[in-house]
Image (cartoon, rainbow, N blue to C red):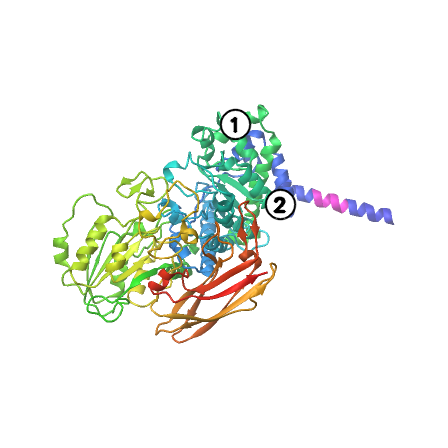
Amino acid sequence: MKKQILNLVLFLALAFTAGAQNKYDYPFQNPKLSTAARVNDLVSRLTLEEKVNQMLNSTPAIPRLGIPPYDWWNECLHGVARTKYPTTSYPQAIGMAATFDVDAMKKMGDFTSDEGRAIHNESLKKKDYSRYTGLTYWTPNINIFRDPRWGRGQETYGEDPFLTGTIGTAFVEGLQGNDPKYLKAAACAKHYAIHSGPESERHVFDVNVSNHDLWETYLPAFRQLVVNAKVAGVMCAYNAYAGQPCCGSDKLMVDILRNKWDFKGYVTSDCGAIDDFYQTHKMFPDAESSATDAVLHGTDVECGNHTYKTLMQAVKDGKLSEKDIDVSLKRLFTIRFRLGMFDPTSMVKYAQIPISNLESQPQKDLALKMARESIVLLRNQPADAQKNDLLPLHKNIKRIAVVGPNADNANTQLGNYNGHPSVVTTVLQGIKNKLKNAEVFYSKATDFVSTEPQDFSKLIDSISDADVIIYVGGISPRLEGEEMKVQVPGFSGGDRTSIALPTVQTDFLKALKATGKPVVFVMMTGSAVAIPWEEENIPAIVNAWYGGEAAGTAVADVLFGDYSPSGKLPVTFYKSDSDLPPFEDYSMKNRTYRYFTGEALYPFGFGLSYTRFGFTNLHLSKTKIKKNETINAELTVTNNGKVKSDEVVQLYLTHLSDRENNPLYSLKGFKRITLLPGASEKVKFSITPDMMKLVNDEGQSVLNSGKIKVSIGESLPSKRSTELGAAKAVEAIINVQ
């Protein structure tokens, strides 16, 4: 009997195997197998030439195995970018950071991958495998915006490691989805690491920073995304670090990323970065040795089409083995399998998102919500002969002048690394939509930059009868950005040579003030701008960043009181160039709010509202703690004004007993709340041992005994914040035993 049963089992097993083989030509095609088993089978079937070609960003098809071509390069910095389809455009990354809105950021990532999947699915139907149709997005940029002159700082989440890591995590989690088997899309943390300009030097720069700065400032956001957010990819940077290219760094790539952080995902080079090994860094004699070094350090994809092609010869020359190539191949195909690229559409819920998903109403609504939340009210004072603050403006205005180079400039609003939405509402159009019965005068008025003396008399005469003047200026992503061919006063190669507002704009604002009319300055920018004259003389200043497709509507909503501004600065606005250390110096000394010893024009975390908030009754669950204890902080926040508004409650820690080399303040928590007039809410924070740790000179996180000041308020707890109108922070002391 036992023998009969055994024969039956063997027969059924053989029948099942035969059926499976009839259904699938190769085991890697079988979705019932584990991802590791499928990847191993697929890689084992590839020739060396096929393997190497799969390590370029644009991979060819392998027809004999039924593998289509694939291009790893795609972008979605603030919405799906560079595609042939219209997509939703959210505020530029620096603007999204100004929202301090984690929930909105996660939803934005979710909506963006919806649109990305829709484009990918439609492209597959059309057998379109071109660039910007894939699901591997080289976003987010989580470099620390250490210096406002860096043109790519607009792509980051600001100068603070905690804010950057928190906002970046929300984006990654939204983009990658929560399916237990499939990635919705694959995010990529870039540029690893210590990369923030100058753009003109990025291919040759060798950065040397202290272990303290490395671990206190430059690495925390990367660690957060790799260890906690489980980001699928990492992009290594152009520059060198401590004598090795970042993509070939023993410390960054092997010791930290792969060993200490146990990163299992894939690494791509920045585009052309492997060429730099021998062409600009001059650290290797040729392409073959450069490619070998990059692969052995864990760089799996070359963004490029030249250097990695030498890997075939490198294997033949014994510089690395085919097994070394296989390590990278397995990482790469693991990502593609996790994206469901080799499974039936019916099995992958994301593969069924239709092209009609693009620019859906919920996506447009979120773009407007985030544009509103990103706007930072920097100044709001009474205009001449007025008793009340200038903003919000009355909607019964009869004549309004809307002037300036960004007043009707859709290109500026879209930032860089952007998509192209069907409709972009400029500030001019937003105001026209708001004021149906008003006479709206428009003129570009000035260029962004001018080297010639300007005569504004005719234009001033033409707006002399306006009830209010809105000047929409600032700068432009056509002036600041990635390695650009720009050489004009104040700007060079994508970076800024001065953080001052271009002189022509200040001169024009002086002419506007001389009219005696109320003047509002709406500034669009991707970075901090020094506007000391404007701060002293223009009654209302609104910072609108590069606000995306709905920026014009959002600005109009703020100007006319349909939305109370609630954005907060994710960077320090300095008074002048003299506040800044040399651009090339990567030491954090006197940089950002955490180490800057001067007085900012507008501090980190600052942003006014149309109401006044009060912060009272701070209570700590314990004031004396051991080094392994977590404590709770609770306070009451009250809307003391007459307008419903959001507020961002910010928690900062300061180590009073251990000052040398350590931050003056460190943001360790924040919560966005909404309060009706007269309403109060209790806000709670948990302060963990990790939050209280400091980085020592060896780069180790430690918690020493001593006093730690807890400050909670609506801005950086500084004298300058209070002078500008921020509520005074409430404070308490923790004694660590």
Per the image, the residue denoted by label 2 is 35
Residue 193 on image: x %, y %: 48, 42
Name the chief secondary structure element in magenta.
helix
Q: Residues within 10 Å of mark 2 (few under 14, many from 20)?
A: some
Residue 289 numbered mark, or none: 1
In this rendering, does residue 276 appear at all?
A: yes
Question: Tag 2, which secondary structure?
Answer: helix
Identity, as a three-letter code, of the amino acid under mark 1: Ser
- When the figure is inspected, residue 375 is found, relative to residue 46, above or below; the finding is below
Residue 294 on image: x %, y %: 53, 34
Residue at image x 86%, y 46%? 3
Q: Nearer the viewer, residue 169 or 377?
A: 377
Dividing the picture into quadrants, the one containing residue 642 is: bottom left
Identity, as a three-letter code, of the amino acid under mark 2: Thr
- When the figure is inspected, residue 725 is found, relative to residue 665, above or below; the finding is below
Query: In which quadrant is the C terminus drawn?
Result: bottom right
Residue 675 on image: x %, y %: 41, 71
CA gap between label 1 and label 2 equals 32 Å
- When the figure is inspected, residue 463 is found, relative to residue 206, above or below; the finding is below
**Span colored in magenta:** 11-17
Dividing the picture into quadrants, the one containing residue 703 is: bottom right
The total of numbered circles placed on residues is 2
Q: Earlier in the sequence, mark 1 or mark 2?
A: 2
- Mark toward the viewer: 1 or 2: 1
Question: Tag 1, which secondary structure?
Answer: helix
Residue 252 on image: x %, y %: 53, 40
Q: Residues within 10 Å of mark 1 (few under 14, many from 20)?
A: many
